């Protein structure tokens, strides 16, 4: 009986050592391997031609509003017709020089966000 109990003890000890070694190896591999990083993590701001997409920028006057819209329409046939200031936003009327189509966008003063409204 002494032999059988000592074999169980050796098996348990071997199993414990193997599990410990596997845990240490896994932990070392996790630290050594580069973590997956998406190109633009949630909440991050991507750099585009108008600045950091999604980042807030306070717009205080018509010149800033015009600069934002001009940057957005840089390579297009759209032109600014009028810019009207409202208490919380700027209302910009646009016109396509080729087709005559019209569009109205607003620029939020507190965030700088541009949105079409029609």
Image: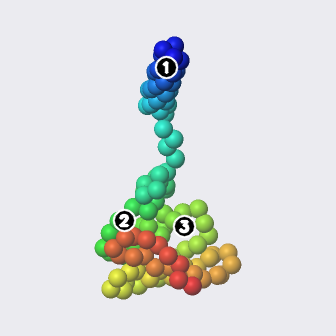
Is residue 63 among the parts visible in the rendering? no
Q: Nearer the viewer, residue 33 or 98?
A: 33
Residue beneath the point at 33% across and 86% down: 87
Mark 1–mark 2 Cα distance, whole angstroms, equals 71 Å
Q: Give the residue at mark 2.
A: 56
Q: Could you tell me which quadrant the C terminus lies in?
A: bottom right
Q: Nearer the viewer, residue 85 or 111?
A: 111
The circle on residue 73 is 3
Q: Give the residue at mark 1.
A: 5
Circle 2 SS class = loop
- Residue density around tag 3, few if under 14, some if 14–19, many if 20 or more, within 10 Å: some
Q: Is residue 63 above or below residue 16?
A: below
Q: Is residue 75 above or below residue 18?
A: below
Q: Nearer the viewer, residue 95 or 58?
A: 58
Q: Nearer the viewer, mark 3 or mark 2?
A: 2
- Of the image marks 3 and 2, the number of the one nearer the N terminus: 2
Image mark count: 3
- Of the image marks 1 and 3, the number of the one nearer the N terminus: 1
């Amino acid at each position: 009986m002494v032999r059988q109990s000592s074999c169980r003890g050796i098996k348990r000890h071997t199993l414990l050592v193997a599990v410990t070694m596997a845990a240490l190896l896994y932990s070392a591999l996790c630290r050594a391997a580069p973590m997956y990083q998406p190109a633009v993590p949630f909440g991050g701001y991507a750099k585009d031609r108008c600045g950091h997409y999604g980042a807030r920028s306070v717009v205080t006057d018509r010149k800033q509003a015009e600069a934002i819209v001009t940057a957005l329409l840089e390579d297009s046939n759209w032109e600014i017709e009028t810019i009207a200031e409202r208490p919380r936003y700027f209302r910009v009327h646009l016109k396509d020089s080729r087709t005559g189509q019209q569009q109205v966008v607003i620029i939020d003063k507190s965030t700088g966000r541009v949105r079409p409204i029609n």
